[in-house]
Amino acid sequence: MYSNLYKAGWVMMDSDARVIDTNELVESRLREQAARQLAAEEGLREGEDGSEPFQPGINPEVVDALLAKDGGENVLKSVSQKEKAALEQEIEEAREQLKALKEQADQMLQNASAQIEEMRMETLTQAKEQGYQSGYEEGMAQAQALKDEYLQEKKELEKEHERAIQELEPQFIHNITGIYEHIFKVDLSGHEQIVSNLLIDAMQKMNYAKSFIVHVSKKDYPKVSAQKERILEETGTLPDNLEIITDVTLSQAQCMIETEGGIYDCSLGTELEELKRKLRLLSYKIN
């Protein structure tokens, strides 16, 4: 505070230099300042006549203390300690305020973090639920689409199957005829021995019958009569037990066998139908 004041003992002066008594100057100024403050307390103000208003100065007690032999240093030390204490108090208060603000900020941050976590979990839960629902609906839609596609393909295959049957049936009949020709080892187109072969095959299956009356068409009668010996030989039938007659109700390749147990139709058409039936049954079993 008085760093610019020098004591006489500290300054070297020559013979022409002017000596300034700093103690005397300080004492004079302090007394003037104390007098002004005392006048102000008594109601006297220098600013009433238009001059500058009085500014309060140092307390007179402080002035007296400063004027004492060792009072200046004690006063300055006391003032310094008070300022230091006040400063330390302000610093402590500032620290307390900062601590309170930090705690408040930490609490706000903690609350904000909790809210953010809650919002995150809620958003995640909603997203999972929406994703599950969306995935379920999407899966059901895909399953329904696959089912519809399968049903459509099934309908198309059924139509294709029916169309194939209709297209293949004539060829199927032709193939059956070829199979039957292979079985009887004859050419059906000539009809030379077809009726005789049909009769022989049927009679061989009738172990219970003893006598046979064979009905053939008028056109087939000569051919069958010519094969009578072969029929008797291959069936083991006695000549008296076999009679061949003409039946005007029958067409070519048709023949009937009458026995004591009943009448058996061994016509070519009947045999082919039976073969078709058996082949169809075999086809169903394979499938």
Image: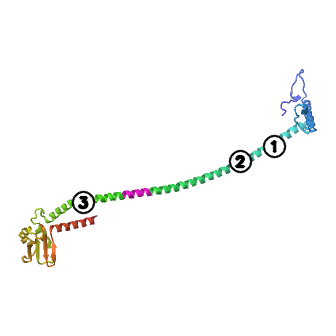
User: What's the residue type where badge 3 is placed?
Assistant: Gln
Check the image and report above or below for 262 versus 69.
Answer: below
In the image, what residue occupies the spot 44% across and 56% down? 139
In the shown orientation, is residue 146 left or right of residue 102?
A: left
Q: Secondary structure at mark 3?
A: helix
Q: Secondary structure at mark 2?
A: helix
Alpha-carbon span between mark 3 and mark 1: 117 Å
Check the image and report above or below for 170 versus 105.
Answer: below
- Of the two numbered discs 3 and 2 on the same chain, state the one appearing first in sequence: 2
Name the residue that disc number 2 marks: 101
Name the residue that disc number 1 marks: 86
Disc 3 to disc 2: CB gap under 8 Å: no
In the shown orientation, is residue 275 left or right of residue 217?
A: right
Nearer the viewer's eye, disc 3 or disc 2? 3
Mark 2 Cα within 10 Å, few/some/many (few <14, many 20+)?
A: few
Colour mapping: rainbow
Q: Secondary structure at mark 1?
A: helix
Alpha-carbon span between mark 3 and mark 2: 95 Å
Name the residue that disc number 3 marks: 166
